[in-house]
Image (spheres, rainbow, N blue to C red):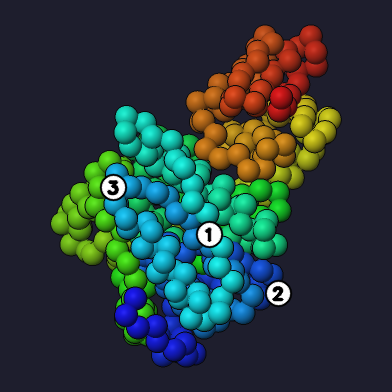
Amino acid sequence: MSKIPPIQKSDSNFPLNVDDSLIPQSETVLAAVSSGGDSMALLLWLLQNHQNFVVAHVHHDLHELRSGECDRDEAFVRAVCEKYSLRYLHRKIDLERRNGHVNESIARDGRYAALVEMALECGAGKVATAHSANDLLETTVLSLMRGASFGGWKGFLPSRPLTESIALIRPFWKIERQELRRFLDANGWEWREDESNLSEHFRRNRVRHEVLPLLEQISGHRADNIAAAFAKNSSIAREEGEYLDFSARKALDSLICKREPRLITLDGNAFGELHIALQRRILRLAVLEIAPTLRDLSFEKVEATRLVAMNRGKRTVWNWRKDLFVEWTGGGSGNRLRFWLV
């Protein structure tokens, strides 16, 4: 980095549509900073607007894709933190290779595990990432390709739990990627481009460089504009979904026959009287009662369970995940739905 300019309260001249409701001033925030444009914009915005944060950098050691570049990313972020006397934490993670390459989900899981570890070290209750409206659109396209269930087609949530005590927050979820670059340019800040973002080994890169340009051609609108419009629609759908979740939670509370830390049992007869939309959400919410960080539940497994309960079928047990089981007890045991973790 050739020059690190002074920080000024320039947000009044260059406003960003940041969802700052996600970042309480009184709580320590761990900011995930990779050295890329989005995360450097997050660091700059926090310097201008937030006092209580710690910078975290995860070194992925992708030597086969970025020889030496991961080391330079880490040095870049460290230099900025030293300039502004910021507390800086970093972890180097060893990622499993499959067929000589790093799987995207493995990289994501490894990164979040490292961020949780650093959040615990500094006492942060929030981990902030710089995911933008473009990331939201790309995530949704990827979700649609693998047959998104429930709310997967709406992309990621602005906030979700990483652990019982630590939440992941995305305050830039409404902002276009190029807007973040303009914010950096207006403040004279530099960033590093990640060459692995061009690699076709990662599906997200192919969506970004092949699918979205095609959408631009078909629609006549820039990908950034499409992303910003989608973020608004996603917000509306999410808010309406939250209302349905509120209704489903009230219904769930009325169905609970037994509740323990790793077990919940529901009245299947009363469950069968509810609207189909509430039934599906209740099954998902029941699982979240005992496994609050679980994501991406299979629609097929949820629907199979719902249909057996609706038809008052014989006793059936499903393994929804490796440690999560669901049982329809059948009429001989009172037509109950049981969820438990092993």
Callout 3–callout 1 Cβ contact below 8 Å: no
Total count of labels: 3
Q: Judging from the image, what secondary structure is the residue with disc 1 in? A: strand
Q: Judging from the image, what secondary structure is the residue with disc 3 in? A: loop
* Residue 179 seen in render: no
Whole-percent x and y of residue 211?
23, 48
- Dot 3 corresponds to which residue? 65
Q: Which of labels 2 and 3 is toward the front?
A: 3
Considering only order in the chain, which callout, 3 or 2, is on the residue closer to the N terminus?
2
Whole-percent x and y of residue 22?
60, 67
Q: Which amino acid does label 3 sit on?
A: Leu
- Residue 90 numbered mark, or none: 1
Check the image and report above or below for 156 versus 257: below
Whole-percent x and y of residue 215?
22, 53
Instruction: Identify which residue is drawn at 43% across, 35% down.
Output: 96
Horizontal side, residue 235 vs residue 76: left or right: right
- Dot 2 corresponds to which residue? 26
- Residue 283 numbered mark, or none: none
Instruction: Identify which residue is drawn at 38% across, 34% down.
Output: 97
Whole-percent x and y of residue 101?
33, 37
